[in-house]
Image (cartoon, helix red, strand yellow):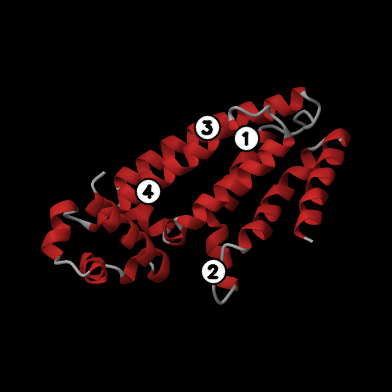
Amino acid sequence: MKGTKKKILATALDLFNEKGLSRVTLRTIAQKMEISQGNLNYHFKKRDEIIENLYFDLVKNIDFRLSKSQNEAISLKLLLGLSASIMDSFYEYRFFLLDFVQIMRENKVIKAHYLELSKIREAQFSVLFNALIKKGILRKEILPNEYAFLYKRFQILGDFWISSAQVVNSRISKNMISEYATIINQSIYPYLTTKGKTTYLLLTNSVHNKRD
């Protein structure tokens, strides 16, 4: 990607994160960069094109983090680490989650890709859950679709934690990732075997001790 395009996307990301979609136009971005709107329009004719580029950058960011984890042995530590890592990516592109419903209503390209990607992510986590069951970390299902629904809880909490943080706090910061990662990760505790719970407590206590 050419330098000017990168600068436009970086500037737009900062503005969207700071002000939200409703207060940022192509003119706002051009003024921030101190370039003409015509120059900006040469690279992006519509604001939606910028939003789509940023969305796919976010997807690449998460894909990269997931690909790095493929070299690790499947474990509870891996699962908990993935949650925090993905949330870190979401924070970098937080405007997308803060304006999630608006984007999904207005941008058919992003919505179609998101829905298809959700199926892929569910399959990826299903493989992870099944491996942890075989290792005796997760218990077997008791209720129908327990782990499919567990993934959906992860997805819902992951997609909307930033909106919640924004509502209940005067401002949000990267420091909140740790707290909300704990909130999400504790969702898995009731599904753990005795061995899994012991491992979970060792992992989380180790993290808390490092912070202290």
Which callout, 1 or 2, points to the residue nearer the camera? Answer: 2
Residue tagged by mark 1? 148
Which residue lies most toward the front here? Answer: 3
Picture quadrant where residue 10 is located: bottom left
Residue tagged by mark 4? 55
Distance, label 2 to label 4, CA atoms, is: 20 Å
Residue tagged by mark 2? 166
- Which amino acid, by three-letter code, is at mark 3? Ser
Distance, label 3 to label 1, CA atoms, is: 22 Å
Specify the quadrant that holds the C terminus. Answer: bottom right
Q: Residues within 10 Å of mark 4 (few under 14, many from 20)?
A: some
Above or below for 205 versus 32: above
Specify the quadrant that holds the N terminus. Answer: top left
- Which amino acid, by three-letter code, is at mark 1? Ala
Picture quadrant where residue 178 is located: bottom right
Distance, label 1 to label 2, CA atoms, is: 28 Å
Query: Is any part of residue 58 visible from this angle?
Result: yes
Q: Residues within 10 Å of mark 2 (few under 14, many from 20)?
A: some
The answer to whether mark 3 and mark 1 are in CB contact below 8 A is no
Task: Identify the residue at horizontal 20%, vertical 69% (top origin).
Answer: 27
SS label for mark 3: helix
SS label for mark 4: helix
Distance, label 3 to label 2, CA atoms, is: 30 Å
The answer to whether residue 105 is left or right of residue 179 is left
